[in-house]
Image (tube, rainbow, N blue to C red):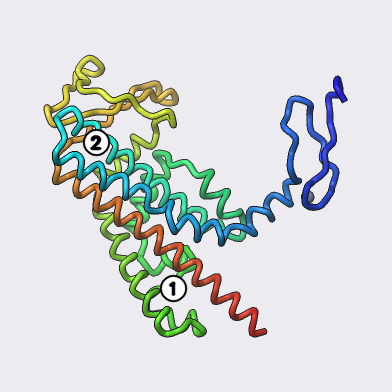
């Protein structure tokens, strides 16, 4: 129908007619069916993400750290910056996952997770929550039991599986503490880096030309324009190996938290399926 301002399509799932404009792409399904389509795949999404995606930040960070040990000075700076980027990504993944899990039932997990963008406010809120919220409350907000509550919450879980889950959740509580302990300094750098555009920050060796604050010889900085605040953000990173090792260990901790969270949520799901099957 060339020339028509409004076109018709039908929802792939329920067959309801959908109208759209000529300049828009043809919708595949209606909004309600799309929510259902995503929700029906949330569990599969979580298990497949847990198998590979969740570890990607840690793998890259560890590889960078190994290369950094033998790298030339300029290469070391690039690798240090990449490690920081993985830290920001790992935190974004974890904070987004926690957000999506808390939204479950109200919003498809896949949408809440993939649409999540870490910004200053959410990065700061995350570290504040880790520092101030009791772990029992944190676990309850995620719909997960404390390790000791596993037998009562999952009565049909085989003993061996209950033991594995208890180990994973205990380790997760330790990793949450470790991540929180990393402290404000890194949280701040994270908040700053997270405020930067998706396009990525430019790397610089010197910043004196920008703000009269010079970098130390072992520092490198990312610069990004903050249009909202009308300023330039400079995130200086020290390429000191000890500090980077610490950061890589926290990336590892965040990766472990993400996988254990998913493991816990999948167990909750399986338990409720077994319960339903018995009814
Ligand atoms: Zn539909």
> Residue 237's mark?
none
Please name whichever residue, 253 or 59, is drawn nearer the observer in this view of the structure.
Answer: 59
Q: Residues within 10 Å of mark 1 (few under 14, many from 20)?
A: many
Q: Secondary structure at mark 1?
A: loop
In the rendered image, residue 55, in percent from the top left (x then y), is placed at: 37, 53
Q: Residues within 10 Å of mark 2 (few under 14, many from 20)?
A: many
Residue at the (33%, 23%) spot, across then down: 232
Earlier in the chain: of badge 1 and badge 2, it is 2
Residue at the (52%, 54%) spot, across then down: 100
Circle count = 2
Does residue 10 sit above or below 175 in this rendering? above
Quadrant of residue 149 within the rendered picture: bottom left
Quadrant of residue 63 within the rendered picture: top left
> Residue 79's mark?
2
In the rendered image, residue 188, in percent from the top left (x then y), is placed at: 29, 40
Q: Is residue 85 left or right of residue 265?
A: left
Q: Which residue is mark 1?
A: 145
Residue at the (24%, 47%) spot, across then down: 247
Residue at the (33%, 35%) spot, across then down: 192
Whether disc 1's CB lies below 8 Å from ligand 1 is answered no
């Amino acid at each position: 129908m060339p020339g028509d301002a409004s076109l018709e399509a039908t929802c792939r799932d329920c067959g309801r007619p959908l109208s759209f404009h000529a300049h828009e792409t043809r919708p595949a399904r209606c909004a309600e069916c799309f929510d259902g389509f995503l929700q029906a795949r949330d569990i599969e999404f979580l298990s497949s993400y847990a198998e590979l995606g969740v570890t990607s930040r840690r793998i890259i960070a560890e590889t960078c750290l190994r290369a950094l040990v033998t790298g030339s000075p300029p290469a070391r700076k690039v690798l240090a910056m990449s490690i920081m980027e993985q830290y920001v990504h790992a935190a974004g993944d974890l904070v987004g996952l926690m957000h999506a899990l808390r939204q479950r039932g109200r919003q498809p997990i896949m949408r809440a997770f993939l649409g999540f963008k870490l910004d200053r406010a959410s990065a700061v809120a995350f570290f504040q929550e880790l520092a101030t919220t009791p772990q029992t409350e944190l676990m309850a907000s995620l719909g997960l039991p404390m390790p000791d509550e596993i037998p009562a919450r999952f009565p049909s879980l085989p003993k061996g599986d209950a033991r594995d889950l208890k180990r994973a959740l205990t380790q997760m509580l330790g990793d949450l503490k470790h991540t929180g302990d990393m402290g404000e300094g890194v949280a701040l750098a994270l908040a700053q880096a997270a405020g930067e555009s998706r396009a990525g920050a430019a790397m610089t060796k010197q910043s004196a030309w920008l703000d009269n604050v010079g970098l130390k010889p072992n520092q490198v900085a990312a610069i990004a324009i903050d249009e909202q605040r009308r300023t330039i953000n400079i995130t200086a990173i020290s390429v000191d190996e000890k500090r980077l090792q610490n950061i890589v260990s926290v990336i590892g901790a965040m990766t472990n938290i993400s996988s254990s969270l998913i493991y816990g949520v999948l167990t909750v799901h399986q338990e409720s399926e077994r319960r339903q099957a018995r009814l």
